[in-house]
Image (spheres, rainbow, N blue to C red):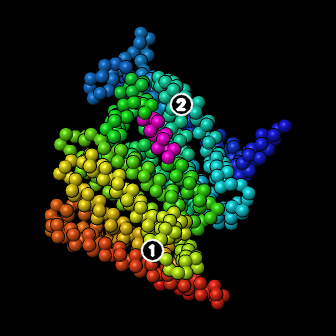
Amino acid sequence: MRLSWIDKLGDKNPQLLREIKGRFKPRNLVISTVISLLGQFFLFRIFQAKLPSASQGWSMPTRHPLCTGDQWEYSIPECLTDAAGNLLINWQMWWWDVFYTVSKFGVFALILAGTYTLISDLANEERRDTLNFIRLSPQSAKSILIGKLLGVPSLLYIVVALAVPLHLIAGIGAHVPLSLIFSFYGLVVASCIFFFSAALLFGLVSAWLGGFQAWLGSGAAFVCLFIATAKPVLHTPSDWLNLFSPFLIFEQIAKATELENYSLSLLSTADLELFYLPIGDALWATLGLAVLNFGVGTYWIWQALQRRFHNPSKTIFSKSQSYLMVASLEAILVAFAATTPKYRYSTNLGHNFQELLVYNLVLFICLIVTLTPQRQTLQDWARYRRERVSNRQKFLSSLLVKDLTWGEKSPAIVAIALNLAIAATTLTLWITFVLQPIDKQPAFLSMVIGGNLLLLCAAIAQLLTFMRAQKQGLWIAGALGAVILLPTAILTVLSISPYQIPGLWLFTPFAWFALEKASNTTIFLALLGQWSAVTLCTIRMTRQIQRAGESSTKALMSDRPSLPVG
């Protein structure tokens, strides 16, 4: 009877049982308990030492942040005493400080330590070759990964669970409503699921980093969490990053206690807007939007996890998934770009569009890397096309177009072009209905030039897949980084500004600044040059695919390995 719950757990999720049995040793449980209790004890003692005390030699009224008297000098209240001579202490403020510190320290420690342990565990499994053994088990990828998600950081969950009573007591002492405390817990759970899922995906796709990947992954999580937590609301598309903070509703929680907290009010999370709607004023709207954001992000991460776990050679996303993902991300970005300018003299909307272009640049570079198939996959597709279509059907045949649009193994350039069309449609609507008339023409031209540059990057990435080199994704990312950043770096080093020779800057991601001085002829020639480069790369790519199909077919016919292509 004692092991019945373990047997049931093993039947439902064998991987979770494996992780728990490997970690729930008496020694590990004792260490986790001691760490949690000692940490709480020392934290409590630190805050206890901050209390004003008559033993400090105060012979006259003094001032202290935790006193209850008048607050007129340096915003520090005067210390008062009762009839017995005891200092009157603002216990609500003291408990709030405890509540806030436990929240911040606990959430950061949980997410960063959990991210590190998950990535490190996958790296160890890969190094011991046990991950391939797990892949061969009859369990589904979802079951295995959920087992990892719940089991690997299980000792951390115990450490945090033991700190919940102190956190609850501190919240109640600070007059925080229980509904808000449990709402915060729900937001923390949603954020942990998101970050831990992202850690699993990073661990699967970055095995080539070796022992460095756990530090890199947890460092990236820290940077993301720090920016989301510390960044004030600016009424720009970057406000989307605030939704990744588990502390998004802390300003509303502080208001519910009726305590003045200037460090929280500086973040201005109550000013958060979405399509001009002031959702930051409504606690439940803010909470719902944050949970929805974590939910959508977690959904896409799990789509990638289930694709890559059993077949590491697959692209991270399928083409059909990429269309929906780009549409959802564009909708989120333009929603946060349509906001009321924070300052009256601000040209906020024009700057917002420039931010949209930068975020789209990053999005599509990542998309190109994740959608581009590997060399062997592309060769298999080329051979399949050659064997199936021996009469050389035209390019626009329905079968080929369907394969290029939806196929798993076909080149990604058509899918990238369709995703660019989705993004361009969304941005065009934003330009039409939101942007000021004076900025509409340069915005539209910047979007077209940026789209051409990304299409060229997609063609270059597809050409690079025919290289015989390991770590294809790293090579592609490096080459695309050079295409994007190198021209800008050269022009900057040579001190050539967009106002001096605007034509050169039209071939960089910062074409917006050059359009003001560029003539119509210069703009037309720049567009013509981009289209010519894309056309040449596409023709070269088509020939390489044809040669790959011919070489692979001949190798199969003669029972010899395929000749190098390029």
Lateral position of residue 404 relative to residue 79, left or right: right
Residue 179 appears at what percent x and percent y? 51, 26
Q: Which segment did they paint magenta?
A: 286-296
Residue picked out by circle 1? 395
- Residue 55 in sight from this viewpoint: no
- Residue at 57 percent across and 52 percent down: it is 302
Q: Are marks 1 and 2 in contact (CB under 8 Å)?
A: no
Amino acid at pointer 1: Phe
Residue 246 appears at what percent x and percent y? 47, 40
Q: In this rendering, is residue 237 above or below 77?
A: below
Magenta residue check for 536: no
Lateral position of residue 57 relative to residue 474, left or right: left
Q: Quadrant of residue 338?
A: top left
- Residue 358 in sight from this viewpoint: yes
Q: Between residue 385 and residue 525, name the one nearer to us.
A: 385
Amino acid at pointer 2: Phe
| Label 2, residues with CA under 10 Å away: few <14, some 14-19, many ≥20 | few
Of the 4 image quadrants, the one containing the N terminus is top right
* Element marked by disc 2: helix
Q: Earlier in the sequence, mark 1 or mark 2?
A: 2
- Residue at 74 percent across and 44 percent down: it is 9
Q: In this rendering, is residue 217 above or below 506?
A: above
Residue picked out by circle 2? 182
